[in-house]
Image (tube, rainbow, N blue to C red):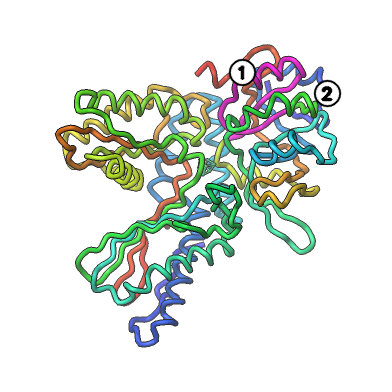
Amino acid sequence: MKVPKEEENMKAGIENGTKIGKDLESVLARLLCLLATHLPKDVAQRIREMAEKENDGAAKKVYDCMLENMSLADSLARPLCQDTGIPNFYVKAGADFPLLGSLEGILKGAAAKAFKDAPLRPNAVDPFTSKNTGNNEGPLAPYIDWQIVEGDEVEITAYLCGGGCSLPGFALVLTPGEGIEKAKELIVDKILEKGVNACPPLVIGVGIGASADIAAKLSKKALLRKIGTENGNPMAKDLEKELFEKLNSLKIGPSGMGGAESVLAVNVEFGVRHPATFAVALATGCWATRRATFRIGKDLKVVSEDFD
Amino acid sequence: MEYHLKTPIDEETVRKLRTGDILYITGRMVTLRDEGHARFLEEGGADIDLKGMVLYHCGPIITKDGDGLEVVSAGPTTSMRLEKFEKDFIKKTGISLIVGKGGMGESTAEACREYGCVHGIFPGGCAVAAASKIKSVGGVIWEDLGMPEAMWIFDAEEFGPVTVNIDTVGGNLMKRK
Ligand code: SF4
């Protein structure tokens, strides 16, 4: 399955807004199906590199299975992993984007259509009754995060947020005295304790800020950053490097089988802290981190560079 | 060592397996997760003989294909979540092999030693590779629990690689790490 071609996208013009809304919904639904069945280029490439470098026999067997899985998912157009997560959308919406008011409905429609077409697994469970809603819908499913920016385009990062890979996540507020050293210790301990359940090798997102909610949001933003990018701040970049080395030295390896590497990347995002707080959060992604960014222009053409 | 095993797997074979061995399974596997384990142990009522069979910690994606059922995607889920049930489950069913992802705890390890069962790991997230080794769906019990939690009965062929994690003589691969 390929990214929809230009002619398959809708034409410019919003005079028949409903029709275009539906078309956009179908295109986005197809991109979500593509996301369930394919890793984005940067993740796939890093996995191939790690597989090639690996010398440990048990770890190699796991990488072989991962590569076989990727190629079968591609040829059969099936979800790479049965846990297709809860769809998350991180939207940077230009204030002058023509369909701004309908975008939420379009994203929900796309998620519902992909649920049937991919097919995705029903993963929305009522927290009190433990009843599965059966259709992947419910309060905050799909989850949509909004940021309004200048301009007439929209950038959407879609992420299929799985269960196992979310298990190690945490956010908490430390005292400044505990600060960054304690934060590193907590992250390493958590990965040691629960990393193996998140289908390693892992993508690690770390957020630092003034309160737990801000740190948590930044950790997810860090998780969604492309592999191979680094934080522009030299000290944040050093923290990325230090954690990368520390976590690799744990020798968890693919599926916990040991081997050379345990993480695909460590990404850090930060904001200021309060004089009295040091909030830190961890978000983890599995080797099958299914994340892609789509741009929708004013002409409603959808473009993504994350797939071949 | 590498083993190609057929269900039912007898106790003597199970007791030969050691941590780090690689297994490929042909025969009957059943899936169960949290809700299914709870119902199995608390209410019972699943009319199925699991002696010598394989329990797979998995919540698959299944589609209806004409009259039959097709396994689309079926990788392992976190075994540790089932730790609180597994000792009783092994005792009650006489199951020979449990397959999931990640490690399990001391209570499961104890039951493995006592009743002759091993826990193995299938590579996490390799759900299409896993599904390709499941040749047919023999049925489903407790579909009302929802697709991930129902008990699916699979007939597998050369299902693997499954790496033995907990054996019957105290070996525990994940604990060593
Ligand atoms: S952690 Fe990722 S690869 Fe593993 S089962 Fe969950 S979604 Fe699938």
- Taking A85 as reference, is B120 above or below it? above
Rendering coords of residue B137 (x, y %): 77, 49
Magenta stretch, residue numbers: B97-123
Label of residue B106 in the image: 1
Q: Are marks 1 and 2 on the same chain?
A: yes
Which of the 4 quarters of the picture holds residue A150?
bottom left
Rendering coords of residue A16 (x, y %): 39, 86
Residue A64 versus residue A234: which sits nearer the camera? Answer: A234
Residue B130 can be seen, yes or no: yes
Residue A287 versus residue A149: which sits nearer the camera? Answer: A149
Which amino acid does the dot numbered 1 rest on? Glu
Mark 2 nearby-residue class (10 Å; few <14, some 14–19, many ≥20): some
Protein chain holding label 2: B
- Taking A203 as reference, is A148 above or below it? below
In the image, is B34 to the left or to the right of A276?
right
Residue B26 versus residue B138: which sits nearer the camera? Answer: B138
Residue pushed farthest bottom? A15
Which amino acid does the dot numbered 2 rest on? Asp
Measuring 51% from the left and 43% from the top, which residue is drawn there?
A163
Q: Is residue B103 magenta?
A: yes
Instruction: Tell me the CA gap for discs 1 and 2.
Output: 23 Å
Which element is circle 1 on? helix
Pointer 2 residue: B10
Residue pushed farthest top? B169
